[in-house]
Image (cartoon, rainbow, N blue to C red):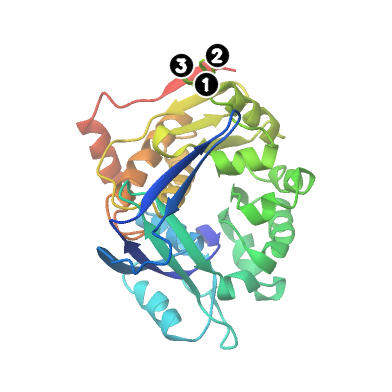
Amino acid sequence: MFDVITIGSATMDVFVECEDANIVSVYSKSKKSEFMSYPYGAKVEISDFASNVGGGGINTAVNFANLGLKTSAIFKIGDDIYSEGILDSFKNKNVDLSNKIQDAQDSTGFSIILVSFQGDRTVLAHRGANAHITKSDINFEAIKNSKLLYIAPLNGDSNKVLDDIVKFAGKNDVYVCFNAGTTSIKRGFNYLKQILETAQIVVMNKEEASMATQIQVRPDTREVKYSEELIHPDIKEMFKKLKVKDYQIIVITDGGKGAYAYDGKHFYYCPVFEGPVVSTLGAGDAFASTFCAALGKTKINIGESLMMASVNSAGVVSEFGATQGLLTFEQIEEKLKQHPEYTYQKLNS
């Protein structure tokens, strides 16, 4: 039996940093958007370059195992030079690979990550085999014999298996942590609601939550300063729409502003744990999977779990690579002891 089994993508990630990249902000009365730009038609010099293994299925499996949980991973790869690199990366990771799917007729996922001078990133993704997971590929018996099923975003045709695995987990009393991706969100709220009803823990970033609920986060105006409130009222409305069952815990991450959670009785806010930022790739995976694991360790203390997730996420963003800076629970607890001023806030619903 596994403590946790993950399902999601597996990719070879190439990180590219360029000092000539610009960040362009575009504002309207109701929306703010930011874009990474390069001189059009120019030959742009790269200032830094690195390659690592990534993808939601792999990142979270490695993190769960690093936190001491017996872990297996379901992911699909091809039979090529990139698949060799992915499999080789697991040699010292203590993750069971008996449930991997390998298809020589498909290509392994590949991503180019454009890193800004602020440490944020834009990802150019080739899904490859990640988009072609079928029901027949999945070892449902392994899911049945797991305590927790962690579902990372499933893209392309792979999203079609989401209904089957969630229903199966529910029927077999397997806890589900659902990290919603854009493919499932774009299928509409009525579809998403069916998945939400079975998941005990749901994690989205603010942009995904806005897309799922169709609620826009309004910027400050001359009359109203929403930014002065601990939790934006529009984020509170997102929580109330996303929480469709009493037993659920909903988490919304908000980049450098921190993360929020809602259990139906209280709202929680946890700021970012400060540290150097090299690349934000993998931060969301580290946060979500650490939060799920920490809920078990803390006996469902949501505030403490948010803090642990933030500390581990800060470790990841301090290095290139989505799993390079991961910490153990002992290391996370030591970091928190060294920073007694770091804490969360709790508000009544």
Please tell me in which quadrant of the rendered image residue 333 appears: top left
Image coordinates for residue 291, horizontal then vertical, percent: 46, 42
Residue at 53%, 60% in the rendered image: 6
Viewer-closest of 58 and 111: 111
Image coordinates for residue 318, horizontal then vertical, percent: 27, 50
Image coordinates for residue 78, horizontal then vertical, percent: 53, 82
Which of pointers 1 and 3 indicates the residue nearer the eye? 1
Mark 1–mark 2 contact, CB under 8 Å? yes
What's under tag 2, amino acid-wise? Val
Q: Earlier in the sequence, mark 1 or mark 3?
A: 1
Q: Quadrant of the C terminus?
A: top right
Residue at 65%, 26% in the rendered image: 237
What's under tag 3, amino acid-wise? Glu
Which of pointers 3 and 2 indicates the residue nearer the eye? 2
Residue at 74%, 61% in the rendered image: 164
Viewer-closest of 213 and 227: 227
Element under disc 1 = loop
Mark 1–mark 3 contact, CB under 8 Å? no
Q: Which residue is mark 1?
A: 220
Relative side of 29 to 307, left or right? right
Q: Which residue is mark 3?
A: 228
Please tell me in which quadrant of the rendered image residue 200 appears: top right
Q: CA distance from mark 3 to mark 2?
A: 9 Å
Question: Vertically, is 160 above or below 326?
Answer: below
What's under tag 1, amino acid-wise? Asp
Q: Which residue is mark 2?
A: 224
